[in-house]
């Protein structure tokens, strides 16, 4: 089955300091209750673009763009993503991949074939809480393997966690950051409600500034580059 896409023509915030287009792939193997893009995960009446349409959009903006961000959903869910990214690479743009880390071998293929330049991995929670946070049973050895592949890749990368009251504690942040090398970049994102969020499952607001600072202080015991995103 061919990949279905949504497309954001221009972004100044999704790839460091570069002007990028953002490509969203349909489908995900996680069922996180706090997902802000449920239309990409579950069946919906959304209108999606074909690969041909997306590549046409990129070509039209080729002289303006510096990079492309491939996100989701979970892009690595699709085996034909490799051929698609090769076509994106042919435009001479830098490629950033967002992933949930559950497909380490597919990610390693992209790295070994020099098809991506930047990797952002969402770390959903401490390993013992992964199933309850993602809504599915994911072997956490895959998460550990992906972290190691990313840290050894030689590419720019970041890890990030969306923290949610009732889901995350200081102990979880400590356990998460113990998985990283000291120099890894780690972003903590505060939970923000949206119209897509189920009010019966999740809180009405995120953590206070003081609580976020507590998370930062805990994380800095294991990694040096920690920020609120």
Image (cartoon, grey):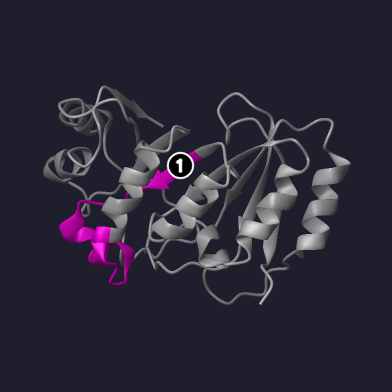
In this rendering, the answer to whether 208 lies above or below 49 is above
**Drawn side of residue 224 relative to residue 45, left or right:** left
Please state which of residues 133 and 56 is positioned toward the viewer in this rendering: 56
The answer to whether residue 59 is visible is yes
Residue 84, by quadrant, is bottom right
Report how many numbered discs are placed on residues in the image: 1
Seen from this angle, which residue lies furthest right? 60
Residue that label 1 marks: 120
User: Which element carries disc 1, helix, strand or loop?
Assistant: strand
- Image quadrant for the N terminus? bottom right
Instruction: Tell me residue 214's x, y (percent).
Output: 18, 29
Instruction: Tell me residue 166's x, y (percent).
Output: 20, 54
In this rendering, the answer to whether 77 lies above or below 94 is below
Please state which of residues 204 and 134 is positioned toward the viewer in this rendering: 134
Instruction: Decide: few, some or many residues near mark 1? Use Cα within 10 Å; few <14, some 14-19, many ≥20.
Output: many
Please state which of residues 29 and 201 is positioned toward the viewer in this rendering: 29
The answer to whether residue 124 is visible is no
What residue is rendered at 85% in x and 44% in y? 59
What residue is rendered at 24% in x and 59% in y? 141
Seen from this angle, which residue lies furthest front? 112
Q: Which residues are magenta?
A: 119-141
In this rendering, the answer to whether 125 lies above or below 152 is below
In this rendering, the answer to whether 173 lies above or below 56 is above
What residue is rendered at 62% in x and 60% in y? 81
- Image quadrant for the C terminus? top left
Instruction: Tell me residue 27's x, y (percent).
Output: 54, 68
What residue is rendered at 29% in x and 25% in y? 183
Residue 128, by quadrant, is bottom left
- 102 part of magenta stretch: no
- 126 part of magenta stretch: yes
**Drawn side of residue 156 relative to residue 216, left or right:** right
Instruction: Tell me residue 20's x, y (percent).
Output: 68, 36
């Amino acid at each position: 089955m061919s990949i279905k896409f949504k497309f954001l023509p221009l972004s100044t915030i999704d790839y460091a300091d570069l002007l990028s287009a953002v490509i969203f792939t349909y489908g995900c193997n996680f069922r996180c209750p706090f997902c802000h893009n449920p239309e990409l995960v579950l069946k919906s009446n959304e209108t999606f673009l074909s690969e041909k349409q997306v590549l046409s959009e990129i070509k039209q903006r080729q002289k303006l763009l510096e990079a492309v961000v491939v996100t989701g959903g979970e892009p690595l869910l699709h085996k034909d993503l490799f051929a698609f990214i090769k076509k994106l690479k042919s435009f001479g743009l830098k490629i950033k991949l967002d992933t949930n880390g559950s497909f380490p071998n597919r990610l390693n293929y992209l790295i070994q074939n020099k098809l991506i330049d930047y990797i952002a991995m969402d770390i959903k929670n401490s390993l013992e809480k992964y199933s309850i946070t993602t809504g599915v049973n994911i072997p956490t050895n895959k998460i550990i393997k992906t972290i190691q592949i990313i840290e050894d890749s030689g590419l720019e990368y970041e890890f990030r966690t969306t923290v949610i009251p009732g889901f995350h504690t200081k102990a979880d942040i400590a356990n998460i950051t113990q998985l990283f090398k000291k120099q890894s970049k780690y972003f903590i994102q505060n939970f923000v409600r949206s119209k897509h969020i189920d009010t019966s499952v999740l809180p009405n607001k995120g953590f206070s500034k003081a609580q976020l600072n507590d998370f930062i202080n805990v994380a800095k015991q294991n990694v040096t580059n920690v920020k609120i995103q």
